[in-house]
Image: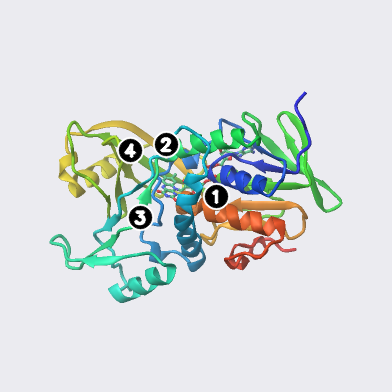
Amino acid sequence: MRSTRFDIIVVGAGIAGLTSALSLQRDGARVAVLDRHRSGTEASWAGGGILCPLYAWRYPQPVLALAADGMRRYPDLLASLDSNIDPEHWVTGMEILDPVGEGESIESISVTLASAGIAHQWRPQGKHDGDALWLSEVANVRNPYLLDALVDTLIARGIELREQCAADKVLLSEGHVSGVSTSEGDLHADRVVITAGAWSEALIPGLPAGSLFPVRGQMLRLEPRSENGLDRILMENGVYLIPRRDGSVVVGSTVEYAGFDKTVDAEAQARLHTHACRLWPQLAGARITHRWAGLRPGSSDEIPLLGEHPSIAGLWVNTGGFRNGLAMAPATAELLAHRMAGRPTSMDPAPYRLERLIES
Ligand SMILES: Cc1cc2nc3c(=O)[nH]c(=O)nc-3n(C[C@H](O)[C@H](O)[C@H](O)COP(=O)(O)OP(=O)(O)OC[C@H]3O[C@@H](n4cnc5c(N)ncnc54)[C@H](O)[C@@H]3O)c2cc1C
């Protein structure tokens, strides 16, 4: 019979849950991860896999700090994987053709990027009045492969992964978490971590409605018939092209507040496709092989929620990655593990605390 008692139960097996589980197990805890579907099939699968925020200087400082820390931690995370699957980590660099928006300047952008430790250069270009921004150290991963490699690693480390197991609610006993009620019955643990992405709000008692919500992003994949020469992530006007190692190109993305709806619509797809071909004309005529949408976990102040519930001891949260959850994952997992173990953290955890949204 399968065990129903663990030290820590992690609810949601996307990038946040899988990386959190690995960091927590390394500290010696007996960890189980639940997912109501197959692991790694929601936002973390749908994303582009760019390991740096787009127009990074436009995010709140706590987001940029986590993303920059995540970028630095990726090589170690990848080296620690116990899997034959190659996540195709590729340092291509990212070129942004329209970096300077209203109220911004080359100087202000440079200062913000330098403070986060993100290498950057300005390059003259023919296309716009201003210079293009070149971020030479930006990488992308083939995120579906990364998720599969993380699952392999979890299993190799003895972490229990329960798929098709939906959490209904956390179980409480005298102000302390005691487990999770699931579609397979009650599972018990003194500590529970909610990493259920866009679906997390319903699992966190006391969180005001609208604190966490889905933000749809549509994508498409192009398979050029011949070598297209795209050797970097290229971005303009919110649309980006990501080269993959097999020669295909991923194009993204829309940002839509449309509830829990993963519909792909023809108009948005046509807009992405047209823009992609304008950005890199060699893509004209490339076959569109896939179109999809995913639901990013958005938060009301665009800052992730990471910390312990202010009035339910043992209930922890790691979600709200919004547009940068893949880039931030190694940093959020480490921050969570340090906080749960009561160790000092290299980053200030205060901006991510739940207290900003939940009254204790
Ligand atoms: C189109 C698009 C492009 C993106 N591009 C990038 C990018 O280039 N770079 C980047 O850094 N980020 C990107 N993102 C954002 C990134 O993908 C997300 O921030 C990140 O994947 C969120 O991970 P997560 O683990 O929190 O959520 P998810 O991956 O959504 O995982 C949550 C998991 O919880 C499970 N779950 C939900 N409810 C329950 C329940 N009740 N019981 C059990 N399990 C449950 C779900 O089945 C799911 O597997 C993009 C997102 C999208 C949609």
How far apart marks 4 and 1 lie (CA) works out to 23 Å
Q: Which residue is mark 2?
A: 86
Mark closer to the chain start, 4 or 1: 1
Cβ–Cβ under 8 Å for marks 4 and 1: no
Count of labels in the image: 4
Q: Which mark is residue 178?
A: none
How far apart marks 2 and 1 lie (CA) works out to 32 Å
Question: Does the residue tagged 2 have its C-beta within 8 Å of any atom of ligand 1?
Answer: no
Residue at 58% x, 39% y: name it. Answer: 13
Looking at the rendered structure, the secondary structure element under dot 3 is: loop
Check disc 1 and give the amino acid type. Answer: Phe
Q: Position of residue 243 (x, y in %)?
A: 29, 43
Looking at the rendered structure, the secondary structure element under dot 1 is: strand
Q: Position of residue 197 (x, y in %)?
A: 56, 45
For this orientation, the residue located farthest to the top is: 1
Image: 313 above or below 181: below
How far apart marks 4 and 3 lie (CA) works out to 21 Å
Cβ–Cβ under 8 Å for marks 2 and 4: no
Residue at 75% x, 27% y: name it. Answer: 2
Cβ–Cβ under 8 Å for marks 1 and 3: no
Q: Which residue is mark 3?
A: 138
For this orientation, the residue located farthest to the right is: 174
Q: Nearer the viewer, mark 2 or mark 1?
A: 2
Mark closer to the chain start, 1 or 3: 3
Q: Which residue is mark 4?
A: 220
